[in-house]
Amino acid sequence: MTIDTASAREIISGLKWYFQAKNLALRSAITIRCPLSVDQQNDIRIYYSLYLANLLSATEMLLEKEYPFSQDFKDEIEKSLSFPGFPDGENNYSYLRELRNAVIHRGFDICSSAHIKDDMPLMIAPQSIINRNGKKSYSAFGFYFLEMISKCEKVVGPLIETHLKSKRLLQPLSTQEQLATETKNHLSNAVGIPDWVKSMAFEQIDNIDHNQIQLEQILNL
């Protein structure tokens, strides 16, 4: 199986964005301490919701049927999310997915209950979550939401890096000429850029080190 170079670059770019957003949301959430103002209560709910949404967006990008290695990644992530006392990785991933669905699509308040430890609010995770049609239920793999986040943070990023390396996606896949042509086509179709600016840009596109740009994107991820 193979993946075209444009799709591979889109995956790298997408994962980079989702991880940036996820990390910012988590950093912001854990800096909020008690006592909580009304605004802080709302903020912490938003931050944890965004963390969950972006974590799942990253993993689901590699689970889309259009991605040729989606089955491999499905097997890998379910294996990686097997923890002591909570060995069912398929259940654990499904719990995260359905919790995300409840938060994003049904407005579930992920911060509706909490314990306080040393002025830090620890959100109590729902101990089971039912899918939308009500036919399946998945159990939590931790009592606190932050406890489950800690487990995910230890395995999901390294897993994605290992997966991408094994599929040879963490390396430049397009030639200088291919990227220059793509850039010119994109510029030609760009809306809102004056023609004189396009003309100036066209003169410089071939001089840009597009391979270095690819490498920097990969290193940033």
Image (cartoon, rainbow, N blue to C red):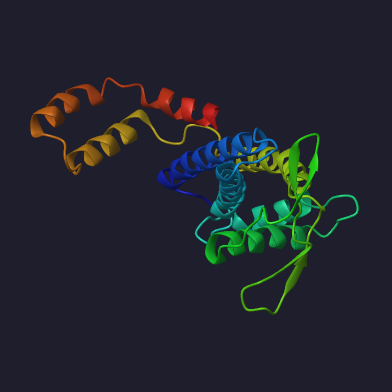
Camera-side residue of 38 and 31:
38
Residue 38, compared with residue 104, is above or below; it is above
Q: Residue at x 55, y 33 (%)?
A: 221
Where residue 107 appears, as percent x and y from the top left, is 56, 63
Where residue 148 appears, as percent x and y from the top left, is 76, 48
Position of residue 88 in the picture relative to residue 7 (left or right):
right
Residue 186, compared with residue 75, is above or below; it is above
Residue 141, compared with residue 131, is above or below; it is above
Where residue 156 appears, as percent x and y from the top left, is 69, 43
Residue 198, compared with residue 185, is above or below; it is above
Where residue 217 appears, as percent x and y from the top left, is 47, 30
Q: Residue at x 52, y 37 (%)?
A: 16
Residue 187 sits in which quadrant? top left
- Total label count? 0
Q: Residue at x 27, y 20 (%)?
A: 207
Camera-side residue of 21 and 216:
21
Q: Residue at x 15, y 31 (%)?
A: 198
In the picture as drawn, the residue positioned furthest to the left comes out as 196
Camera-side residue of 5 and 65:
65
Position of residue 129 in the picture relative to residue 203 (left or right):
right
Position of residue 19 in the picture relative to residue 119 (left or right):
left
Position of residue 170 in the picture relative to residue 99 (left or right):
left
